[in-house]
Amino acid sequence: MKLTPRQCEAVDVNLIRRDTCVIAGPGSGKTTVLVEAFRGLVQAGVPPLRILAITFTEKAANQMKKRLTEAFKSDSKLRIQIERAYVSTVHGFCARLLRENAIYAGIDPQFRVLDEREAESVAHKTAGAVLDEMLATQPDAMRPLLRGVASTDLGAAVLEVYDVLRAAGAAIETLAHESDPRPEPANLEQVLNTIETLKAESLPGWTAKQREHWQAVLEWALKPAPVVASRSP
């Protein structure tokens, strides 16, 4: 199989006796590189059960297992080890690790991994139940939250914040020490000054929709203030 220079570097046994991460776009040969790297390590004497290969989809994991089994089909001992090797998705590896150590983990070995739809449903139900309990037991603490969240579904809003924190690798405890990231609201004078600045610019790169909206704002800003007449009673 012909590999590119970068792919050859990625599968070089002299360079991959360490943790390796393959990052590339769809259809660029990530699975092929992982398979060749795995095969190179095995051929260099590394036992298959000492190699952890992680990919993101079940399809890619199954494809890797199939190709590796085919590559070592003439060696029954290696083929059996490869069939038992840790080649899977992240959640597949974690589930296998927990099942193999269920007693130490203190969990039922017959557990199953929820799919995305089930997990989302459980998360929403749990968030709703917790918020209801907090509202019943800590009403004073909950009222500011209810007033401050611009959403009719507080549970969904809380889960959205949690997802953002998790993606950023931040702990919930850090929120208490963070300053409010929202800017101070602008007053009318600041708005008019910004409009005056934009009037002097050519606005390169603006779309037709943006220019249309800008024109409406400009017309509003240049509109004379209404004269209010009043008389004494």
Image: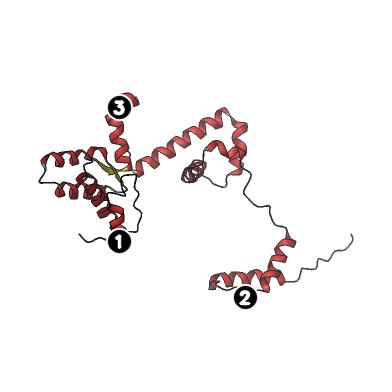
Left/right of residue 2 with respect to residue 212 in the rendered view: left
Where disc 2 sits, the SS reads loop
Q: Which amino acid, mark 3?
A: Ala
Q: Which amino acid, mark 2?
A: Ser
Q: Which amino acid, mark 1?
A: Pro
Q: List x then y, in percent, for residue 100.
A: 27, 30
N-terminal-most mark, 1 or 2: 1
Task: Name the residue beneath numbered marker 3.
Answer: 102
- Residue 202 badge: 2
Question: In 3D space, how far apart are the residues under numbered discs 1 and 2 (Cα atoms)?
Answer: 47 Å
Asked if residue 114 is positioned above or below residue 133 in the image, the reply reads below
- Residue 5 badge: 1
Observer-side mark, 3 or 1, equals 1
Question: In 3D space, how far apart are the residues under numbered discs 3 and 1 (Cα atoms)?
Answer: 44 Å
Q: List x then y, in percent, for residue 224.
A: 75, 71
Q: Which of the pair 89/223 is nearer the observer?
A: 89
